[in-house]
Image (tube, rainbow, N blue to C red):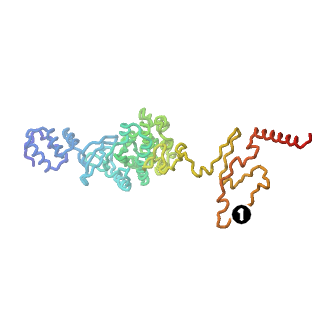
Amino acid sequence: MLTTDLGACEWFVWDLRRSNLIDRGQLDQVIGEFLSKNPGAEPPALAEYLKAQGVLTDFQAERLLQGKTQGFVLGPFTLMDALGSGSMGTVYKAQSKTDSKEYAVKVLPRRSMWNVRIARRKVRLFEQCQHPAVVPFVDVGTAGGMHYLAWPMVEGETLDKIVQKEGKLSPERTVQLTIQAAEGLDLCHQQGLFHGLLKPSNLMVGADGSVRILDFGIGCLLAETEGESLVDTMSTANSVNSGLDCASPESIMDPTNLTPLGDQYSLGCVMYYCLTGQYPFPDGTAVEKMMCHQHKQPKSIKELAPDAPDEVVAVVEKLMQKAPASRYAGCAQLIDVLRPLAPATGSVRSRPTKTIPRHRPAAPAPEAARPATPTASDKATARPVPRGNGPLPPRAPSAVAARQQPTVPMRTVSPAATKPAPEKVPPSAPPPAAVEAAPPAADETRPLGQRLGTFGVFLLALLAGAVAWLACSLVLPR
C-alpha cells in the first residue's frame, strides 16, 4: 500500500487504480519513486513520467487527465490508442493479454447490440477463411456497458486516403488492387460470408502493395435473417448510409439485403473511385444518392479518365449493373476477366505499349552497310549492263529457274554450227545439272529483232537491199 503523500496527484492516482491499466503493486512502486524525487508534483508531470517509463500511452494519459477511467480494458484487450470513429462506433488499437499481439477493436454502445451469440457463430465461420486479403473477424464480447468486435491489427494506408493524397490511380494499379480484393471476397463467398459494407476506407494497402479488407463480418451481422439481428434497425441504417457512396441498389431498398452480388457492385464503385478520383455520384443529399444508385448512370469513366483501357471500363460497367443478375456470376469469373489485363510481373498488365521481343531476329543490314566488293556468288549471277537506247532487259532468271524452264533462243542455227552431242558422263561424275554453268546472258536468249531494236532493223534492211542491188548489177549483163 502506497504511504507517500500524494498531494495534488491524489485524484489522478485513484483514477489510475480504477482504470485497471496497471497492476496495483507496479503502480505503487512507480509512483513512490517519482514522488520521492518530485514532491508536490502535479498530475501532468506524473503522467509524463509514466509515459516515459512505458507504463501509459499518450492516449491513455490524455483520457485519465480528463477524468475518464472506464472502457480501457475490454475482455482480454487493453485499449492503447484511438484509430478513428464510424457510424457504428470507435475503432481502437488494442493489445491482447492472451498473446500480447495488437488488434483493432471496434467499440459499440450496449444499446445498439443485444445478441452476441450470433456474432460468435460468425467468428467460427471466419476461421475457415484463411486468405492474405481477408482480415478475419476474431472475437466479440461485452464489457461493462460496451460491446466490442475485434480483428487482427494490420499496418498500411486506406485506399480513400491514398487517392486523396495521390489523385486518381493508374488503370494498372487499379486492376492490381481489384484482383487481390476479389480473391479474398471469392473465398469468403464460398463459405457463405460476404462483406456488405465494402468501400475505399475498408481497403487497407500495405507498404508492399498488398490489399487487406477491413471490417469483414459486420455486414453478415447486419443481414442476419434468422429472426434475430445483432444490431438494431437504426444502427443498421446508419451503417448503410455511411457506405452510401458504394452501396448497391438492392441494399438501399432493404438495408439487410446484403449479398455477394452486392459486394460486386460495391467493388465496381471502388474501381470507379480509383480510376476517376471521385465516387460514382459524388454530389447531392443522401436521398439523391440513393435514387442515383437505383436509376441513374454515373458520368462516363472515359470522360474523367481518358487513358483507361476499354477492357477495364467494361469490367466496371458490368460490376455496376443495377440488376444483380446482370453482374458476374461470381468473383471467380471476375478474376478470370481481370487476369488477362494483368502485367507480366504477376498482378497487372501494363497498358498497350511498344514492346521489344526477348529474342528478336537479326535485322538485315542496310544497303550502305553492305560490302562494296562483290563476292563470288555476286560475280556468278551478275548481268551485263545493256548499252544503247533499247529497252532494259528483264531480270535474269535464277539458276534453278533456268533449269526448270529453259528458254530457247529464237534464231536459226546452221547444221555446221551444231555442236556434237555431249559424251555420256560416267556414274562417278556428278550429274550435268550439278555442274551446269551460269545461265546464258540475257542478250543471247532474246530474239534478234529485240536485240537490234527498231533502228537496227531498219539499217539491216537497207544494208540487205544494197547488197542485193550490187549482186544484180554484177550478174546481169549491161
Between 353 and 155, the one lying in front of the other is: 353
Percent x, y of residue 56: 19, 45
Label 1 Cα neighbours within 10 Å, binned few <14 / some 14-19 / many ≥20 = few
Number of marks present in the image shown:
1
User: Going 51% across and 41% down the picture, which residue do you hit?
Assistant: 310
Q: What kind of residue is marked 1? A: Glu
Q: Quadrant location of residue 38?
A: top left
The quadrant of the image that shows the C terminus is top right
Whether residue 307 is visible, yes or no, is yes
Percent x, y of residue 190: 43, 54
Percent x, y of residue 51: 18, 43
User: Going 74% across and 52% down the picture, which residue do you hit?
Assistant: 408
Percent x, y of residue 363: 52, 47
Between 324 and 316, the one lying in front of the other is: 316
Horizontal placement of 61 versus 386: left or right? Answer: left
* Residue indicated by mark 1: 423
Q: Quadrant location of residue 177?
A: top left
Secondary structure found at label 1? loop
377 vs 159: above or below: below
Between 205 and 439, the one lying in front of the other is: 439
Whether residue 110 is visible, yes or no, is no
